[in-house]
Amino acid sequence: MKRHLKKINALIENFDVETELALQSVSKTKKYKKGEFLLYQGEICKSSFWIEEGITRKYYMNDKKEVTTELLFKHDLAVAFSSYVSNQPSLEFIQAITDVTVSCIDKNSFRDIKENHPQLIQLDLLMTEYYTMWLEKRLFEFHTLNAIERYKLLLLEQPDFIRHIPLTYIASYLVISLETLSRVRTKI
């Protein structure tokens, strides 16, 4: 996945001037305070959020319990993908866990400028591939790693950020109880 991310970064670094200006024209920097929502469940996801600073999470409600499905960090893309693509209400919330700065791109504006900028079509494809690879990796981890291994992997991949995430969110993300997470943490 790191190799794919390098391809994305290389493409962005080599945008021609017109493409770069077009992308800047539809990008808006927004700041969200800890606890604020980038997207509410039931809203249609009309924007993508490139995380420049901070941590967000995606979650849904199940029997009055919050179920965290994704933890998103600097240089991740926060989007309710099904809602974004299908124009249907989102099944999930996107919430700032810390103060967050994002580059927000409106879906329709991005679609319009892609027509005249082939590099943006390529970027869109690479980002979709990256997200698909990430989802596949996460599913694989759930089927092959135990709770301790999943927690260690999260620590390995995000050592600087993990201390900012409430343990209830981490437990939910790892699909374990808070008590199990507590036992896992004492073993490490």
Image: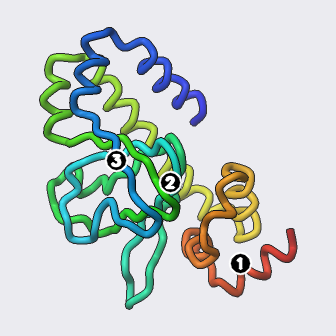
- Could you tell me residue 94's position as x and y percent? 37, 63
* Disc 2 from disc 1: Cα separation: 20 Å
Q: Which of pointers 3 and 1 indicates the residue nearer the eye?
A: 3
Query: Which residue in the rendered view is the most extreme toward the bottom?
Result: 63
* Res. 135 in view: yes
User: Relative to 130, does residue 68 appear above or below in the rendering?
Assistant: below
Q: Quadrant of residue 161?
A: bottom right
- Could you tell me residue 121's position as x and y percent? 27, 25
| Crowd tier of the residue under label 1, counting other residues whose Cα lies within 10 Å: few below 14, some 14–19, many 20 or above | many
* Disc 3 from disc 1: Cα separation: 33 Å
Which amino acid type is shown beneath numbered disc 2? Leu
User: Relative to 168, does residue 76 appear above or below in the rendering?
Assistant: above
Q: Which of pointers 2 and 1 indicates the residue nearer the eye?
A: 2
Position of the N terminus by quadrant = top right
Which residue does the image show at 36% across and 14% down from the upper left?
15
Residue of label 3: 30
Q: Quadrant of residue 119?
A: top left
Which residue does the image show at 28% across and 23% down from the upper left?
120
Q: Secondary structure at mark 3?
A: strand
Which amino acid type is shown beneath numbered disc 1? Leu
Q: Secondary structure at mark 2?
A: strand
- Could you tell me residue 30's position as x and y percent? 34, 47
Residue of label 2: 72
| Crowd tier of the residue under label 3, counting other residues whose Cα lies within 10 Å: few below 14, some 14–19, many 20 or above | some
| Crowd tier of the residue under label 2, counting other residues whose Cα lies within 10 Å: few below 14, some 14–19, many 20 or above | many
Which residue does the image show at 47% across and 52% down from the upper left?
135
Q: Quadrant of residue 123?
A: top left
The numbered mark, 3 or 1, whose residue comes first in the sequence reads: 3
- Could you tell me residue 188's position as x and y percent? 86, 68
Residue of label 1: 181
Q: Secondary structure at mark 1?
A: helix
Q: Are marks 2 and 1 in contact (CB under 8 Å)?
A: no
